[in-house]
Amino acid sequence: MKSLFLSFSLLVFSFTLFAQTPEDKQAIQNLVKTMAEGWTAGSGEQIASVFAAEHDFVVWNGYYMKNMSPKLTTKSFDGILSSIYKDTQHFATIDKIKFIRKDVALIHVFAAIAKKGEGRPADPEVLWTGLLTKENGSWKIVSFHNLDLEVFENEETRKRAPMPTSVMYAGWYSENK
C-alpha cells in the first residue's frame, strides 16, 4: 500500500512539476499579439522580437530560411512591410497551444492580412505553426511555418475540402462573433 501511495505521489508531483501555468499560456498569447501588432505598425523589429536568437522560417510559398537571426528577420519584415504589405493590418487567432514539455510549446494560429481600415477578413488566409521554447523565462519562436490556405481561393476548392471550412477553421469564426 505504501508503494502504491508513493507511486501515486510521484506521478502527481511530476504532473505538477511539468504543468503549464496560466502565465505561460498568457505569455504565448502576448507573443502572437506582439507579432500581429508589429505587422500592423509596420515594425519588423517588433515582429523579430518574438523570435529566438537563431530560428528557422518557412514562408507560405515554401521558401525555407534556416538559422535566421532577429536582425535578418527585422530586415526581411521591414522590406515587405514598406512595399507589398505597406499599410496593412494583421489579424491572428490562436487555434491551439500544445505544451510538449514545460519549456517547449507548439502553436497553430489562423491569420489574415487586410488593408488598414478594411476590418477583419471573413476567412483566414494562412495557418502558421510555431515551435516555441522558453528561455530565461521568456517564450520565443525557434521554428515558424506559414501555410497558405488555398481552400478559400474559390468555391470549387471549398467543395473539395475534406470537411466544411467552418469546422476545419472554427477557431477563426468563433473569434468573429
Image (cartoon, rainbow, N blue to C red):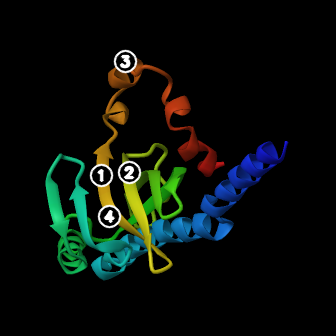
Location of mark 2 (residue): 129
Camera-near label (2 vs 3) is 2
- Residues packed near mark 4 inside 10 Å, few (<14), some (14 to 19) or many (20 plus): many
- In what element is the residue under mark 3? loop
x, y percent for residue 11: 69, 50
Q: Earlier in the sequence, mark 2 or mark 3?
A: 2
x, y percent for residue 135: 42, 75
- Residues packed near mark 3 inside 10 Å, few (<14), some (14 to 19) or many (20 plus): few
- In what element is the residue under mark 1? strand
The reply to whether residue 43 is in sight is: yes
Between marks 4 and 1, how big is the CA–CA gap?
A: 10 Å
Tell me the residue at 21%/75% (across/down).
Answer: 69
Between marks 1 and 3, how big is the CA–CA gap?
A: 24 Å
Camera-near label (1 vs 3) is 1
Location of mark 4 (residue): 142
Location of mark 1 (residue): 145
> Could you say which quadrant of the image residue 174 lies in?
top right
Between marks 3 and 4, how big is the CA–CA gap?
A: 34 Å
Pick out the residue farthest to the front.
2
Count of numbered marks: 4
Tell me the residue at 30%/43% (across/down).
Answer: 148
Camera-near label (4 vs 1) is 4
Camera-near label (3 vs 4) is 4
Are dots 1 and 3 in contact, CB under 8 Å?
no
Amino acid at the residue labelled 2 = Thr
Are dots 2 and 3 in contact, CB under 8 Å?
no
- In what element is the residue under mark 2? strand
Are dots 2 and 1 in contact, CB under 8 Å?
yes
Image quarter hosting the N terminus: top right
Location of mark 3 (residue): 160
Q: Earlier in the sequence, mark 3 or mark 4?
A: 4
- In what element is the residue under mark 4? strand
